[in-house]
Image: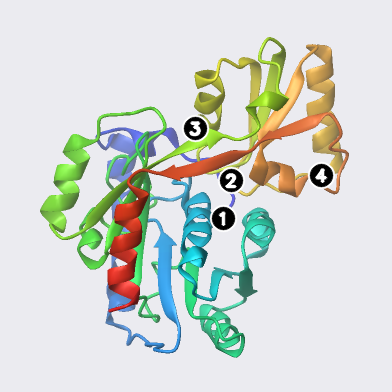
Amino acid sequence: MKFKKPKFWDLRKPNFISLFLLPLTIPIIINNFLLNKKPKQNFTKVKSICVGNIYIGGTGKTPTTIKLFNILKKLGLNTSVAKKFYKSQIDEKIMLEKKTKLISEKTRLKIIEKSLKNKCELLIFDDGLQDKTISYDLKFVCFNSENLIGNGLLIPAGPLREKIESLKKYDGVFIKNDNNINTIEFEKLIKKINQNIKIFYTNFEIKNLDQFDISQKYLIFSGIGNPENFRKTLLKNKFNIIEEIVYPDHFSYNANIVNDIKNRAKKKDAKIITTEKDFAKISNLNHQDIKFLEVDLKINDEIRLINFIKTKIYE
């Protein structure tokens, strides 16, 4: 889905636009109800972890998946990452291919079949919480502390794929909190819904900061779910941003667009920087003089996370 997120989605309370759109959430409610009634398939020969979200876009789902892969492959299991193929999400596929052992097919059932042929012991699904046909051994929901659940309503009135009450069906939560925002009230809400759910905090750290001269002027561009996070990460590290260009999530670049970006930067005597996901999509275009920010996801209390996962996949 290529879209620019409506600003009213992230208001802390619904406004008149979201209330006007409330009737359009009824099909989502019905669809979610019917999906939950579908019989689930169990696969005993391969363990599965699903990392997904109920908030649309910008929760750090793919970086969290990559981090889990790097952590869990050390446990000695033959581990792969699973990603259902979407042509519109080729940026995430490229990142996962580069940084993990990826299995990508048109359906998640075909992914599982392929994993069994490869004698895979553990599959980490990037996305798929809303695919109710598969019984995952462990289910994580990702949030971003900047937005949390927005106005709390389902699409199109708000940014949620499922109601927040759906957390009662899940095992753990990752909250990406780059700016140390107070999330105590959100934690209380989560625990009220599911007192047994485990909460873990994550944050981004820049890996290639030494490649940039922060005294220079920068034009930045991105086509991701949460461009505000990209900009705030740069500002937090004292980058001098003079212009920002925001495209829809999973945006498809072409030569003309890239050349336009470079011309705008040249007129302002600015360097260009983008996200790693966006850079993957322009790697076969005229990307010279464009750099990307390489980040690493850190998980607070990683040992507690590993022990929690072990109880689920070894039980």
Q: Secondary structure at mark 3?
A: helix
**Which residue is at 59% across, 50% downward?**
2
Q: Is residue 32 visible?
A: no
Q: Is residue 99 visible?
A: yes
- Distance CA(mark 3)–CA(mark 2): 13 Å
Q: Amino acid at mark 3?
A: Asn
Q: Nearer the viewer, mark 1 or mark 3?
A: 3
Q: Secondary structure at mark 1?
A: loop
N-terminal of the pair, mark 4 or mark 2, is 2
Q: Amino acid at mark 4?
A: Asn
Tag 4 residue: 254
**Which residue is at 32% across, 41% downward?**
148
- Distance CA(mark 4)–CA(mark 2): 15 Å
- Distance CA(mark 1)–CA(mark 2): 7 Å
- Distance CA(mark 1)–CA(mark 3): 20 Å
In the depicted view, which residue is nearer to us: 43 or 264?
Answer: 43
Give the number of the disc on residue 1: 1
